[in-house]
Amino acid sequence: MAIIPSAALVFDLDDTLFPERDFVLSGFQAVGDWLETNLSLGGFADVARAIYLRGERARIFDLALAQLKREGNPDLIAQLVRVYREHQPSLSLHPDARWALEAFRSSHKTGLLTDGYLETQRRKVASLGLDNAFDAIVYTDTFGRAHWKPSPQPYRTMMERLGCPGNRCAYVGDNPAKDFVAANALGWQTIQIEREDGEYREVNAGKEYQAQHTIRSLFELEGLMRILYHGT
């Protein structure tokens, strides 16, 4: 692959490079293990998984505990959330993500820009073996909750760390609700990956929130980046 001088390719993490569902289900298991050890309450992981897989995304812990006939008081829920966020998962990259990180590292500046609670995201990165896989990693939580995506602050920071202006940066993400609006405003190329089982593949967003390009696999990036930066 030809080197594209001063071009940066920046990736989102969850559901872009690995299946976020794997972390969620791993977290449910960690919470279930804690409940069984500390409160002699079994079955949580299976119940929470079923609730999640039917499409629920809010108050899953409360719903699962209620189904298990256990009161979910605020202190208990807070403890379970800590266990979930701080557990050490075992995760694997999507095959096309592994290929992309290897293929583009030698031809582009590369970055990871990821949303979410800092220690949780760091554990994901460590589990995936990505600590040293990029020229720069930006965790939005280091700026505080007010500067999670879609705040432009993390994108500006990435530009500074990579030494690239917006018109030489491309961002690959999966969630139109937050991934692309700031990058669009800063002049980046924006690319949405629509995986077949992607959590946000059917999200409707205003024009300014939409990615400029859509792919179904990261294997498509090679041809797209060549068009964007070489015009061929």
Image (tube, helix red, strand yellow):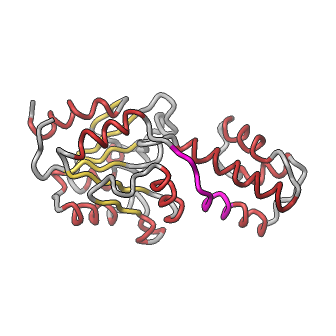
**Residue 39 position in % (x across, y down):** 86, 60
Q: Residue at x 34, y 48 (%)?
A: 11
User: In this view of the protein, which residue sits in the foreground, 192 or 101?
Assistant: 101
On-image quarter of the C terminus:
top left
On-image quarter of the N terminus:
top left
Left or right, 173 with respect to 90, comes to left
Give the magenta range. 81-91
Instruction: State which quadrant residue 157 falls in.
Output: bottom left
**Residue 73 position in % (x across, y down):** 82, 65
Instruction: State which quadrant residue 173 falls in.
Output: top left
Magenta residue check for 205: no
Q: Residue at x 66, y 64 (%)?
A: 82
Q: Residue at x 23, y 45 (%)?
A: 189
Magenta residue check for 84: yes
Instruction: State which quadrant residue 152 falls in.
Output: bottom left
- Looking at the rendered structure, the number of numbered marks drawn on it comes to 0
**Residue 34 position in % (x across, y down):** 76, 58
Q: Is residue 63 above or below residue 232?
A: below
Q: Is residue 50 above or below residue 196?
A: below
**Residue 9 position in % (x across, y down):** 25, 48
Q: Residue at x 28, y 44 (%)?
A: 190
User: In this view of the protein, which residue sits in the foreground, 171 or 3?
Assistant: 3
